[in-house]
Amino acid sequence: MDYFVQQVINGLQLGFVYALIALGYTMVYGIVRLINFAHGDVFMIGAFIGLYTIERFQWPLAAVFVSAVVGCTVLAVLIEQLAYRPLRHAPKIASLITAIGVSLFLEYFTSLRQVFGPHYYSFPRPFPVVSWHWYGILVTNIQAVIFLVTILCLLLLQFIVFRTKMGRAMRAVSFDYVTAGLMGVNVNMVISFTFGLGAALAGVGGVLYGIAYPQVNTFMGFMPGLKAFTAAVLGGIGNIPGAVLGALIMGQSETMVSAYLSSTYRDGIAFVILILVLLWKPTGIFGTSRTEKV
Amino acid sequence: MNPYWVQILMLACIVAISAQGLNIIYGYAGLFSLGHAAFYGIGAYTAAYLMKLYGGQSQAAFLAALLAGGGASAAVAYLIGLPTLRLTSDYLGIATLGFGIIMKVVFDNADSFLPELGGARGMTGIAKMTTIPWVIFFLLVSLLVVRNTIHSSYGRAILSVREDEIAAETMGIDTFQYKMVGFVTGCAFAGVAGGLYAHLYTFLHPSNFDFFKSIDLLIIIVLGGLGNMSGTLVASFGWIFLLEGLRVVLPPGYVELRWVLIPVLLIVAMLLRPQGIFGAHEFPFLREKGTR
């Protein structure tokens, strides 16, 4: 039983990090209907910004998070403006291929020796690790930081989306961007803002991931990105609580499979769950299906 | 021509066969599939396994193994298609992507149920059977099959499902059935191509059939122009020769720049020509009878 509860906590830790990435996928998809494959690599850049600011500059943790957020936001807005905006009215597949291109570029460009380099780097611990034993269950302050920071980000996101003018504009654009434009919403700005907001969360996620699983590499964004996207689809893509729920399911299932079956099956289980859920609800757990009218 | 380039040429033909399969699935039937490499892998492992156990060096057995590989892919595609082809566009994409990753995990762990498959260590000891005549034969067959299917009443039904599913349904077309026909045929092509691949390189590794290979095929058909046989053909050769050509052209020590340049080229190609290189133009021998 202790072992099980321990795994639940480890699963939550992973799930929270996935949630931060999944939110970016789900918001971008909700607005421009694009699977932004480059999002996982923005997450990787966030982790590397964390690595450099902690190791080279020894900045305090708050400054590390702020720099990762700023760096990722700028990067995502640039990507959106240079690569996706010119293709907004082209067939959707052209944007998707471009997104894959951006993803490959970020991975391989940063793995050049002159940039970050192709190796695995150990991620420094920004604070000494303290662990608490509690009825046979081990909780570390790393997990506490992850839970606190993620929940703070979620509350902030909830506030932005539902309590600000920009949030209202985002919801309007995701509902119908042509009409939103006619109503005086600056659609281009809202789309850039959404990319930036998603990337900011991914930046935070990157730093947290580095702290929790202290090894980074320029290709590290691929699998978490794919799983976070799967989580977003699982929860119903375009739906913010759905993305969080999907990510938590994903984190739990993966940890449980590693703990009770074999870690070689870990990458597969997430997708088995996804396919089963899609068979039961073809648009995800919280997804609403649109009836097509003739 | 030196043997290295002959091998690359054969690889290009094999990739073209597999890409024609994806072209049927996504280009003609409009089914967004991100897991095509899984079917390529199923064909490769099936054919290699059968040849290794029963085939020896016989050409007839090789043909049978290739067809069995295609058949295995088609059978799996049918089983996967039954539940998933009901999903719409991006959801189908993500489900097939998921299937691709599951198959990669299965290939990685395959040695636990069939030791000959090698699992994560890779499968060795496959006979080298693939030759230029074989690949050209199958490439021509695949082109003929696609051309003749697309310009038949079956093909028009498949196209109508892509264009407007509701309209097709009201005209009495069983949309699910035609989606299935497109999906299974396309996956069978991938299976045959996989068998040829296995007997060209004589070594199989699960990483040969991962997500990136599915993406390669997707890039090829989009670059060529979706639903365009000539474009798919040209883009397959262009892609493979670009990958290998850059290896030769780039000065030593800069080979890692390959994957920095390729995405840039890809992005530029998409920005300049989102409809693909060929757009709607087909080579004369691939057009409909009467318009050639």
Image (spheres, coloured by chain):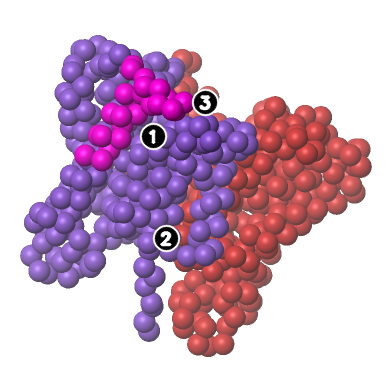
Residue at (37, 61) in percent of width and height: A286
Q: Residues within 10 Å of mark 2 (few under 14, many from 20)?
A: many
| Among the 4 quarters of the image, the one containing residue A212 | top left
| Badge number at residue A13 | 1
The answer to if A141 sits in the magenta stretch is yes
Q: Position of residue B190 (x, y in %)?
A: 66, 52
Q: Is residue A189 above or below residue A50?
A: below
Callout 1: chain: A
| Badge number at residue A123 | none
Residues at discs 3 and 1 in contact (Cβ within 8 Å): no
| Badge number at residue A285 | 2
Q: What's under tag 1, amino acid-wise?
A: Gln
Q: Residues within 10 Å of mark 1 (few under 14, many from 20)?
A: many
Q: What's under tag 3, amino acid-wise?
A: Arg
Residue underneath mark 3:
B247
Chain in purple in the render: A
Residue at (56, 44) in percent of width and height: A269
| Among the 4 quarters of the image, the one containing residue A50 | top left
The answer to whether residue B116 is left or right of residue B187 is right
Separation of marks 3 and 1 at Cα, in angstroms: 42 Å
